[in-house]
Image (cartoon, coloured by chain):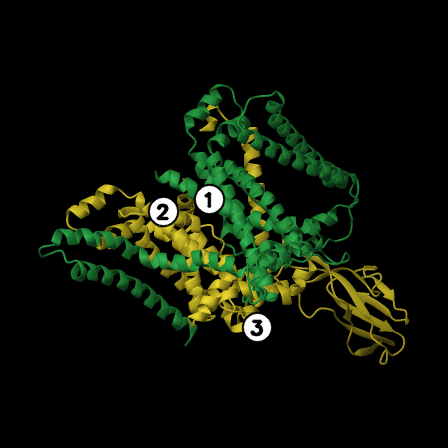
Chain colours: A yellow, B green
Amino acid sequence: MDNIAGSKPALTWAVHISAVLLVALWVFPTLGLLVSSFRTSDQIAGSGWWQALSTQEARMPAIRLKGEEALKDGVFMIEGNLFDASGAEISRWGINSKDVEAFEAGETTALPSGEALTVEADGTYRLSSTQSMADLRMPRVFVTAETPPQFTLDNYDTVLFKPAPGQSVGKAFLNTLTVSIPATIIPILIAAFAAYALAWMEFPGRALLVAAVVGLLVVPLQLALIPLLQFHNAIGIGKGYLGVWLAHTGFGLPLAIYLLRNYMAGLPRDIIENAKVDGATDFQIFTKIILPLSFPALASFAIFQFLWTWNDLLVAMVFLGTTDNEMVLTGTLLNLMGSRGGDWEILSASAFISIAVPLAVFFAMQKYLVRGLLAGSVK
Amino acid sequence: MHPAIQAILTIVIGVGGCIGYFWASNLFLDKVLFPARGPEAGRNIGRANMIRPWLFLAPAMIALGLYLAYPVFATLKLSLFSKGGDTFVGFGNYAAMMGEAKFWESMRSNALWLVVVPAAATAFGLLAAQLTDRIWWGNIAKSLIFMPMAISFVGASVIWKLIYDARAADQAQIGLLNTIWMKFEGGIGSVLILQILPAIMLGVFAALMVWLLWSLIAPMARGMREGIWTRLGRILGAAITLGLALVTAGWAIGAMTADLPYGTPQTWLTIPFWNNFFLMAVLIWIQTGFAMVILSAALRGVPEDTIEAAILDGANAFQIFFKIKVPQIMGTIVVVWTTITIVVLKVFDIVRAMTNGQWGSQVLANYMYDKLFTAQDWGVGSAAAMVIMLLVTPILVWNVYSARKEMR
């Protein structure tokens, strides 16, 4: 390798640090969304996700005091706690929206109407006056408090089981699954037979066909939208799952044939010729020898196609339709971004549900994915 | 029928149908049409073997023809007809499209994307490949950088929108970019990092372009004898480098003299022109992993003796990388570059989800979608699709050419 001449420790450190920075840059965006999806909307709005683990100091919305007054030693008192139940700790507080950090915890101040107000660090307050406060409009208190870190699964619960109309992520999840599984399986078989013919059968025009497949690899599917929609209407499929499956099958075939042909062409010639000598037909050679041997290539195409159909937006939007019942995950997410763009607790949980399956497939089958990429590109 | 049942049924029918078709058609060919017995057994086997490839190919060829080849011509035809598709208007749709400001905005954005995204993704990929190949935890690092490949463009848009989020100045910023931005208050540190440093980097790039320009035209100035095509190539290259040098020099001056709005949170996606770069960041983030995986494999394939020879000759790490390794994997770099270029030409989801083409960020694919399905104008929409096809065609021709060369 390149360090045969010995490596300098400084350079090694520089490599490690640069790699850490690069990885951090690539992981942080996703991590941010993941962390946000476990926080309440107040927490998300109150501080950045990178502060989720630390105790946060945040200004809280104004709290109006309430409570029964009691007469004690000739002084009218109202006592209570600003918080219902939490480990929040007040650092500063105020009674005027223009100066919300006027006092420290434990300090006492006089209200404009004459009463004395004390707020302690744990949120207990005491309002005292020499006259009855029965008809007093109770003052508002602005607090800056530190709250301990807190995580919740409520966002996922809301998104999956109590969705707003037209934003059902659970339904969209099932729809996406319905689109992507047949759209992954069907092209594989069709492509495998064609790839075998292109790799191991002799016939005129074979080279031309391979070239055509390579050419079709890059044809943008944008061109196919209107003609295929017209075609589907003409043969009576219209918009629906059948149309999406057919479209995904058609669009996935060039890559499938290309990957499988390259892989099958690399299989040892001896095996196939021996089988032929032993009297096997092409059909038998294909099903008994080629197909089992091509498993790695089949797996890598299956992963590609699954990721592509799961993550696709355009084909689903055009061929499936955009009503609430027909939405796939990407479409639902797009709608949510438009209608609830600021509700990060909803958006982040929905987004994570949509990327969880492809991420799981990715990490489980990464080996095949890499192999497929290399077979498709490095030649 | 419930869609899930329909899906299972489709899988069964699809898979069963495929197997059934191949099995039955083979059986028919061997037993009924050309049976391998009787007086013509030998001839029949030959005939069957001539037909069999086409049996194997038929379903794929029909699907490919119908779903990819036919639409190219149908779209071409649609682009020559009026809005509803009934009257022939010749190149009227193309003329109408050329007259639209939004179309030229899309072309400009797409051009910008085409230059920046493949270059940045390939460069980052090369960097990541080189770094991760040298450390013991390289495989974990690779996995993490590669991970965005599995995330949908829409999902990635949500992820990045959180980074670009902006809140009023008196509230806590929850977007990473604005949090960093609000740390700059306009003092000497801000000027140094946000103005002088970028200006120096852009200036260096401009100087590099001028040097490249000189090395391109110097042989011509010396009056070297060359073919007409080499000379044309030199002139074209010189024009591109000159343009890039002027643009970056202009940007460098702009960075120095800019009056940055310190202390105000920025809504990054609504800043015309610059928002394009914030959208591109998403695609670069996704595609870098792809570039890294392929370039890393190529780098490992570089013969070791070339590197050993370079080390013996006293080359340092940078010289080994740029003068020994990079030239040897140039072919792979081109493949990566063109693959990302195709992705860029078709980019749709990211723009749709983040800005929907507003604030000067329209791209061709989204422009086409708007024309086809919002304005219901099939003529102009198909014309826009044909423009995308036209832009892909050089890559298509090149791919077919190199595939044929390889097969020989």
Q: Residues within 10 Å of mark 1 (few under 14, many from 20)?
A: some
Q: Which mark is residue B397?
A: 1
Indicate the amino acid at tag 2: Leu
**Label 3 to label 2, Cα distance in Å?**
49 Å
Q: Dot 1: what SS?
A: helix
Q: Against A359, is A277 above or below?
A: above
Which of the 4 image quadrants contains residue B350?
Answer: bottom right
**Label 2 to label 1, Cα distance in Å?**
13 Å
Q: Nearer the viewer, mark 1 or mark 3?
A: 1
**Label 1 to label 3, Cα distance in Å?**
45 Å
**Residue at the location (70% across, 56% down)?**
B166
Q: Which mark is residue B71?
A: none
Q: Chain of mark 2?
A: A
Indicate the amino acid at tag 1: Val
Residue A54 seen by the camera: no
Q: Residues within 10 Å of mark 2 (few under 14, many from 20)?
A: few
**Residue at the location (43% across, 48% down)?**
A215
Residue identified by numbered label 3: A166
The one nearer the camera, B238 or A95, is B238
Q: Dot 3: what SS?
A: loop
Instruction: Name the side, left or right, on which B405 lies relative to B141.
Output: left
Q: Which mark is residue A208?
A: 2
Q: Dot 2: what SS?
A: helix
**Residue at the location (46% across, 36% down)?**
B331
Q: Against B315, is A112 above or below?
A: below
Q: Residues within 10 Å of mark 3 (few under 14, many from 20)?
A: some
